[in-house]
Amino acid sequence: MDTDVIIVGAGPTGLMLANELRTAGVRSLLLERRPHLRETPRANGLGGQILELLHFRGMLTELHEAATDPHPAPRFPFGNVHLDLSGLTDPPMTAVQIPQPRLERLLEGRAQRLGARIRRGHELTGFTQDRDGVSADVHGPDGPYRVRAQYLIGCDGSRSAVRDRAGIRFPGTVCPEVNRLAQVTPADGTARHDNGDLDVPTLGRLSPGFTRNGHGVLGFGWLTSEVMLISTTEDEDTTYEDDAPMTLDELQDSVRRVLGAPLPLGKPLRLSRYQFQDRHADRYREGRVLLAGDAAHQFPATGVALNAGMLDAVDLAWKLAAEVHGWAPPGLLDTYHTERHAAGARTLLHTRAQMALRRGHDTAAEALREVFRELLGDEAPRRRIGALVAEADTRYPLSEGAPHALTGTFAPDLSLDTARGTTSVGALMHTARPLLLDLADRPELREAAAGWAHRVDIRTAGTHDRPADALLIRPDARIAWAAPVGAPSDTLLPTLRHSLSTWFGHPRADDNRPHRPATGHVRPLAHDEDARHARTR
């Protein structure tokens, strides 16, 4: 094999996958047909559950440093209705304003430091797979060549060549509308009122929010006192190429059609155009070929695609690593489709609801939006919708029988007291290794897990108001097993061993010695490839 995994597509999903695979000691080759990083931002922010995961990888500080606004107010559009979470002390959905090219540079730099190979200007032209691997045909600057790997992953967007060549269906529709989005400065002489209203010649006073009429929808708001956010939505049959840039004149023409009057605009800081699709691959795996990100799903609303795609990458990476290193239990890689296809379907659910809220023009549709606004005036619905958009409410079906309430959920970032000082769950997950966290000093649980100590970090720590006596946490920060507080050992030990075997394979046969786990030491991230392979096998 020339490499372990070939990744096609160097967007945020492919780059996140390359980072996670290298952290797990897997050799990866990332192929991107464009010779240079795309400078036109297709997204201008990152939000949802992926931010907590990046915190668990120790990457959130670097992300904040690269952001244009690391802590924007948690206010989000939901089908042209405002979802305002700013009044909540712990909002379920947060975001970071960062143009996509800047995010990609950050992820690419980290992947290269970890040893990932990234080839720009190299286009996949075909592939064949057999029971042992995948042979990919590539055309690069110096001509065609072939590379072989155990697996090939399509992260190559909505028009995925990998998906098409693998014969995976991508059913759905293209929404009959064109959306234009811009960040611009106000035109010289524009009158802005203290409440943010804008005086528009020949039209009058324009308030922040959404203006809807029979011609379309105009969105208007302020990112800062000097930067306006302008968007338009119009029904239109034209299909635009992804790389076709939008001009300020095109935006102004669209604004004029929707408003019926020109809106003076100053200097454009960002111009983008997009068309929504509602599509979902019928399966995320075909043999040794798998899909992630936009190649697997397209959502008819903004603000969720990066979150979903990068979470796909995190779920997939550790399972691929288990296969590459030879210890994956039967069916482990198939759970990627099971878990992430269901998560994609749930994201489609709320984005389709947003489309219904957004597109209706009659009195019934306006009544629906008004009722929805009233519901979002109460805290409980705001939290429910915020968690839905963030994918923070996703729970994987990880246990048989009657699981603990925490199983399948994202691990809480508990503050931990250990013999070596204070740490946190997030800090212990920087290495992306499985973790058995004993929160009640129960040696019988640590002893039961001793055979898996070569694959699972075993830690003992205390925490205030512990949610369970112990947590078994997968590398993607999902809780695979939890011990109810005070539960007897005779009921816990069989289920713990079952979960360890289900997710992390057979125990080491010769490791029946009493295990003496560390109590708070965080293993440093190894950058040497041989050290990584030795650690993860």
Image (tube, helix red, strand yellow):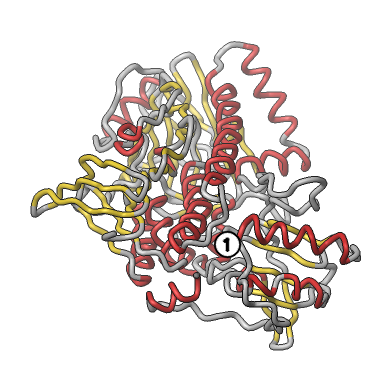
How far across and down, in percent of the image, does residue 401 sit?
80, 45
Of 178 and 388, nearer the camera is 388
State the SS at label 1.
loop
Task: Identify residue type, mark 1.
Answer: Pro
Please state if 261 lies on the left or on the right of 355 as rendered. Answer: left
Q: Residues within 10 Å of mark 1 (few under 14, many from 20)?
A: many
- The image quarter in which residue 343 lies: top right
Task: Determine if residue 184 is in view.
Answer: no
- The image quarter in which residue 188 lies: top left
- The image quarter in which residue 203 lies: top left
Q: Which residue is mark 1?
A: 475
Residue visible at 31% across and 54% down in the picture: 149
Of 385 and 85, nearer the camera is 385
How far across and down, in percent of the image, does residue 189 sit?
37, 42
Pick out the residue farthest to the front: 510
Q: Is residue 216 positioned above or below 57 on the image? A: above
How far across and down, in percent of the image, does residue 318 sit?
51, 59
Task: Determine if residue 315 is in view.
Answer: yes
Residue visible at 37% across and 33% down in the picture: 274
Of 416 and 340, nearer the camera is 340
Q: Is residue 175 positioned above or below 165 on the image? A: above
Number of numbered markers: 1
Please state if 25 lies on the left or on the right of 92 as rendered. Answer: left
Residue visible at 36% across and 30% down in the picture: 167
How far across and down, in percent of the image, does residue 132 sit?
35, 50
Pick out the residue farthest to the left: 142
Residue visible at 37% across and 65% down in the picture: 111
Please state if 397 lies on the left or on the right of 316 as rendered. Answer: right
Q: Quadrant of the N terminus?
A: bottom left
